[in-house]
Amino acid sequence: MNENGFMRVDDVARELGISKSYAYKIVQKLNAELREKGYLTISGRVNRRYFMEKLCYGGAERKDT
């Protein structure tokens, strides 16, 4: 995974074990929520911290070794 503050659709699909088309829908939904809160968003990418909070129940980020 890319270690910057954003996840791409490929990263979301891999993390959740889903198709890329469904990952796009999730990224779009999360970005819509962020826009409603007044944040700027980047199409096709989602903030990693927000993703973990919303989809991983706020737990610590998984570290792959």
Image (cartoon, rainbow, N blue to C red):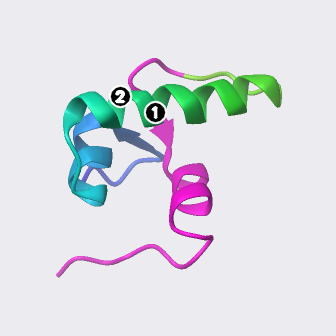
- Asked if residue 7 lies left or right of residue 11, the reply is right
Which residue is rendered at x = 79% and y = 24% of the image?
Answer: 36
Image quarter in which the N terminus is found:
bottom left
Question: Residue at horizontal 45%, vertical 36%?
Answer: 26
Q: Position of residue 49 (x, y in %)?
A: 57, 56
Circle number at residue 3: none
19 part of magenta stretch: no
The residue that label 1 is drawn on is 27
Structural crowding at the residue carrying mark 1, measured as other residues with C-alpha within 10 Å and reported as few (<14), some (14–19) or many (≥20): many
Q: Please state which amino acid type lies under the numbered disc 2.
A: Tyr
Q: Residue at x 34, y 54 (%)?
A: 3
Q: How far apart are the two marked residues, 1 and 2, measured between alpha carbons?
A: 5 Å
**Above or below 9: residue 41:** above
| Spot occupied by residue 64 in the image (x, y as percentages of width and height) | 22, 76
Residue lying at the far top of the rendered structure: 43
63 falls in the magenta region? yes
Image-based side of 50 in relation to 45, left or right: right
Indicate the position of residue 63 as horizontal and vertical percent values. Answer: 31, 78
Q: Secondary structure at mark 1?
A: helix
- Most extreme residue toward the right is 37
Please give the range of residues in magenta.
42-65
Q: Position of residue 53 (x, y in %)?
A: 61, 61
- Label 1 sits on what residue type? Val
Which residue carries the number 2 mark? 24
Residue shown at 35% from the left, 28% from the top: 24
* Residue 46 relative to residue 7: left or right: right
- The answer to which of 56 and 62 lies nearer the viewer is 56
Circles 1, 2 touching at the beta carbon (< 8 Å): yes
Label 2: few (<14), some (14–19) or many (≥20) C-alpha neighbours in 10 Å: some
Residue 42 versus residue 8 in the image, above or below: above
Q: Which of the two residues, 29 or 7, is positioned nearer the viewer here? A: 29
Q: Secondary structure at mark 2?
A: helix
